[in-house]
């Protein structure tokens, strides 16, 4: 998977964001048009940043409020939903890349640094899945030949702050360093962001005949990764 996922970097350099997030899918689409006999399909990992209205949002409820979301949406438009698979998601868990820190890595790190004022967002909602679970879902979807556009998230949604606290508590971390704030007061963020990215993922789970995981189940799964 190749993408420029930093919302701030996308906002500062839209051309680079388009080149990385959109043009790869455009090039693939062009290749397939030029070689119609090639049996190839694209699996797109898209984003829940495409949802801004009160959730849970369905796949048709699209509204991009930042460059990152717009470039991911453009990437989707280049693809063929009768062949390709597009998954809008937000995944959490321990980073597999040494130079890229995940949300939960950030929580664990700050709990150890002794910083007594780390701000977490209490009015930004999402419906995440764990990285490991998403990988299994993708494998299953490819195996059964699933195509089209789907939300892939947990059942229900939770604020980023509540997720951070729940995750830390399951690891027995002191949560006194975290302080909930509203998005509008987050001075460390400059690019516009949606406040409700909660998704309705029922179509995806019905397609694979699976039960959607509860959000607290996702919190526990991710916490367990840090005990290994």
Image: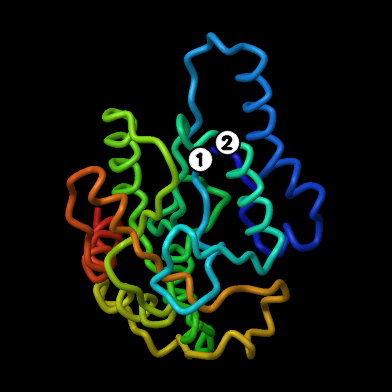
- Kindly indicate the quadrant of the structure image that contains residue 119: bottom right
User: Depth check: 180 or 75 in front?
Assistant: 75
Category of crowding for the residue at label 1, using alpha-carbon neighbours closer than 10 angstroms: few (below 14), some (14–19), many (at least 20) = some
Which residue is found at the position 78% from the left and 47% from the top? Answer: 16
Q: In this view, does 94 lie above or below 196?
A: above
Location of residue 191 (image quadrant): bottom right
Whether pointer 1 and pointer 2 mark residues with C-beta atoms closer than 8 Å, the reply is yes
Give the image location of residue 206, x and y in percent. 23, 50
> Residue sitting at 30 percent across and 72 percent down?
156
Q: Is 85 on the left-hand or right-hand side of 194?
A: left
Determine which residue is flagged by label 2.
79
The residue closer to the viewer here, 222 or 21, is 21
Quadrant in which residue 77 is drawn:
top right
Please tell me which of labels 1 and 2 falls first in the chain. 1
Give coordinates of residue 146: x percent, y percent: 34, 35
In three-dimensional space, the C-alpha distance between marks 1 and 2, rounded to whole angstroms, equals: 9 Å
92 sits to left or right of 62: left
**Local SS, label 2:** loop
Disc sitting over residue 14 in the figure = none
Answer left or right for 215 relative to 97: left
Question: Where 95 sits versus 39, above or below?
Answer: below
Percent x, y for residue 31?
A: 65, 19
Q: Is mark 1 on a helix, strand or loop?
A: strand
Residue 133, position as x, y percentages in the image: 29, 49
Q: Mark 1 points at which residue?
A: 44
Circle 2 crowding by C-alpha within 10 Å: few under 14, some 14–19, many from 20: many
């Amino acid at each position: 998977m190749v993408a420029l996922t930093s919302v701030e970097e996308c906002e500062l350099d839209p051309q680079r964001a388009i080149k990385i997030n959109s043009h790869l899918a455009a090039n693939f689409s062009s290749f397939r048009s030029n070689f119609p006999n090639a049996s190839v399909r694209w699996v797109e990992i898209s984003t829940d940043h495409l949802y801004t209205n009160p959730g849970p949002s369905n796949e048709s409820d699209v509204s991009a409020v930042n460059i990152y979301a717009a470039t991911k949406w453009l990437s989707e438009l280049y693809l063929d939903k009768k062949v390709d698979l597009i998954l809008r998601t937000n995944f959490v868990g321990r980073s597999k890349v040494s130079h890229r820190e995940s949300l939960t890595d950030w929580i664990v790190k700050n709990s150890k640094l002794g910083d007594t004022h780390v701000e977490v967002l209490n009015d930004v909602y999402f419906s995440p899945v764990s990285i490991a679970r998403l990988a299994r879902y993708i494998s299953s979807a490819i195996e059964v030949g699933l195509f089209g556009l789907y939300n892939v998230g947990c059942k229900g949604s939770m604020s980023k702050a509540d997720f951070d606290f729940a995750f830390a508590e399951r690891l027995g971390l002191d949560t006194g360093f975290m302080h909930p704030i509203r998005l509008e007061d987050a001075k460390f963020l400059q690019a516009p962001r949606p406040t409700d990215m909660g998704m309705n993922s029922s179509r995806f789970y019905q397609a694979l005949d699976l039960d959607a995981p509860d959000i607290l189940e996702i919190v526990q799964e991710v916490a367990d990764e840090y005990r290994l």
